[in-house]
Image (tube, helix red, strand yellow):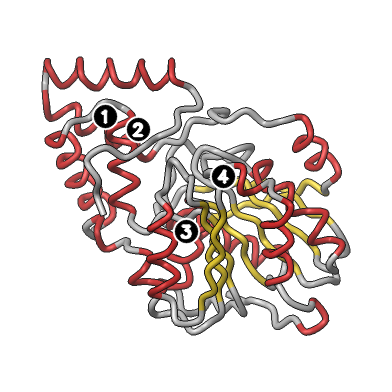
Amino acid sequence: MTPSNPRHAAANPLLESLFRKTVRGVGRVYPPASGWLGFQLFATPIRGYYPVPDSDRVVLDRAQSIRLHTFLDDGQRCRLQTYVWGDRTRPAVLLLHGWMSSAAQMTNFVDPLLEAGFQVIALDGPAHGNSSRLQTNSRHFGQAIKAVIRQLGPLHSFIGHSFGAAASLLLLFEDQSVTLPQLTLIASPAETQFMMHVIARAIGANETIEANMQQRFLQRYGLPIDFFSMPKMAATLDIPGLVVHDRDDRLIPFEQGEAIAQAWPGAEFLGSEGLGHGDILRDAAIIANVVQFQGDPALSVACRG
């Protein structure tokens, strides 16, 4: 799915204006370089792009802060920031944030999950929050998840938002050693190609520049960008899933969440209205449904990988 004019809610319009002027200016001087620059921007999240409310910082301050270390598939070492709440003997739920965000984005799930009897772990993905790296991708997020499993113990489930949701689905699709009783995806994109299109338009790239970005994606990852289709991956899963999406999501259209749920044999779909892409993580009814879907911690069969 590649609409001609995807809606994009800019959290920092001045910064995006600067990107657009830079990409267009480079394109006028040397067009191939604008494709290279566009791909670098696609792979480079901007820390602090979304402001963190004080209420979210308070929840992070209550956590046990644990630094993990792992090597990613490019051979480079990565320092990962994790936050842990609750009794370490309880089944653990891992919270996974979206692109250019951090663990703080997911803190509204912490207390409801603790009250339901779970331990909670939140991760700053590579190149996000207080974790190291400059650039990252969905496979790096998956490798970070595996580092959490190895170093903090088995997990009961993942709850992922947006990019974090897509990365968790990719991990289960590509790595059969990672087994999980269930998975929750919130506001997940259906196609990586669509997300490149959103970013390309946000930085002022035209169709030629975007095609160059896709070619550089192929060169970097060895697979065309349309390989990374979440519905195709979801269709291979044999575990229960909950897919949550809001009709008024201005970044990832509602139909993309529906497409994932329809392709996933064991999925339930939960739709909402009026919450958009971010506020869906703060809605009490959505949170209650997501926590209920995690099931009874006393019956947990933990994920290993």
Q: Which residue is mark 1?
A: 37
Q: CA distance from mark 3 to mark 1?
A: 24 Å
Taking the spot 39% from the left edge, 35% from the top edge, the residue there is 8
Q: Position of residue 120 (x, y in %)?
A: 76, 59
The image shows residue 102, relative to residue 89, as above or below, that is above
> Rounded to the nearest whole Å, what is the CA distance between mark 2 and mark 3?
19 Å
Task: Judge depth for marks 3 and 1 and give the one in front.
Answer: 3
Residue under numbered circle 4: 274
* Residue type, mark 2 in image: Leu
Given residues 59 and 73, the one toward you in this image is: 59
Q: Residue drawn 21% across and 50% down?
A: 219
CB contact under 8 Å: marks 3 and 4 = no
**Residues at discs 1 and 2 in contact (Cβ within 8 Å):** yes
Local crowd size for mark 3, using a 10 Å CA cut-off: few (<14), some (14–19), many (≥20): many
| For residue 256, side relative to residue 215 (left or right) | right
Number of callouts: 4
Quick one: which residue is furthest to the front in this view? 273
Question: Dot 2: what SS?
Answer: helix
Quadrant, the N terminus? bottom left
Separation of disc 2 and disc 4 at Cα? 30 Å
Q: Disc 3 marks which residue?
A: 167
- Residue 41 circle label: 2
- Of the pair 150 and 176, the residue shown nearer to us: 176
Q: From the viewer's perspective, is residue 285 above or below residue 261?
A: above
Report if the CB atoms under discs 1 and 4 are less than 8 Å apart: no
